[in-house]
Image (cartoon, rainbow, N blue to C red):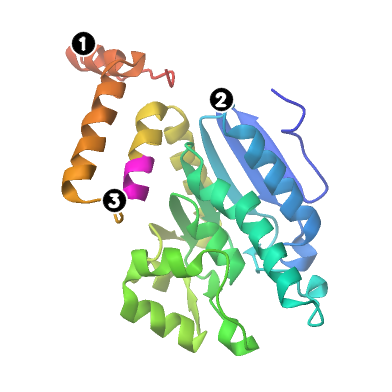
Amino acid sequence: MTSVLADTDVLGVEVTDGLLELTLNRPDALNSLNLELKGALAEVLREITHDASVRAVLLTGAGRAFCAGGDVSEMDPTRSPEEARTRQQKLLSEVFLPLARTPKPVVAAVNGHAHGAGLSLALACDIVIAAETAPMSFGYVLRGLTPDCGITYFLPRLLGMAKTKDLLYSGRRFTGLEAAAMGLIAQAVPDENVVSVARERAQGLAQGATVAFALTKRMLDQSSQLSLEDLAEVEAYSQAVTRSTRDHAEGVASFTEKRAAVFQGL
């Protein structure tokens, strides 16, 4: 394992049996995204893309929050529009896009407060499991701001335009239980179980056919931009690739032998 995948003051890092656990660790600031935390996330996400020893990722927060969004103490209203735009593009290109596009399956355990960019950080993951009472919101308009960090990409695809406008225009708070009911996240569980349930899910993914996961993720990302004909062609190509993997051979053998498959991600 490379030295990059190590704890920092603001980001807990642990790798066990192919599962990388990342814990946002600024509990006194509700794990808000300051420059140090953004940099730590960017470094780890950059490193794991081609690291075969990492087969799945679990992202959660320390304390009573997942992530409360941007760090207000680092927001400068006197910053020029060009400087603000450059900072935002850096955050997108180094954290949010790598998280959303990594070929590794990513599970978010939303253990508490998730607001604005913090909730977008969760939605950039593949599967979101939240505490039933976790407070969530997209409160940009309440601060006179427009949404950021990919929210206008994720929300319409998850909820449709009508519900997206309701949440973004009102900025209202809702719970993890409500988020699950509206289809924003995969599952809401009792607060005390959220990390253990999400970890179990992520561990299962880490032991799965990760080449197939990566290609499936890429196809789903492209599904809203491609025609049926083009997407069917991508499916055919992906099937050809996965049919040549050891994991496919193991999947067939385990079915024939009536046993659980042991995948290696190869």
Residue 17 is labelled as: 2
Residue 250 in picture, x, y percent from top left? 30, 14
**In which quarter of the view is residue 207 placed?**
top left
Amino acid type, residue under disc 2 in the picture: Asp
Which label's residue is closer to the chain start, 2 or 1?
Answer: 2
Q: Report how far apart the C-alphas of labels 3 and 2 lie in the structure.
A: 32 Å
Above or below 266: residue 26: below
Q: Residue at x 67, y 48 (%)?
A: 23
43 vs 237, left or right, is right
Residue 144 is labelled as: none
* Magenta span dominant secondary structure: helix
Q: Report how far apart the C-alphas of labels 3 and 1 lie in the structure.
A: 35 Å
* Residue 183 visible, this angle: no
Q: Which residue is mark 1?
A: 257
Q: Crowding at label 3, few (<14), some or many (≥20) Cα neighbours within 10 Å?
A: some
Mark 1: secondary structure: loop
Mark 2: secondary structure: loop
Q: Residue at x 58, y 54 (%)?
A: 96
For the residues labelled 2 and 1, say whether their Cβ atoms are less than 8 Å apart. Answer: no
- In magenta, the rendered stretch is 217-223
Which residue is nearer to you in this view: 87 or 40? 87
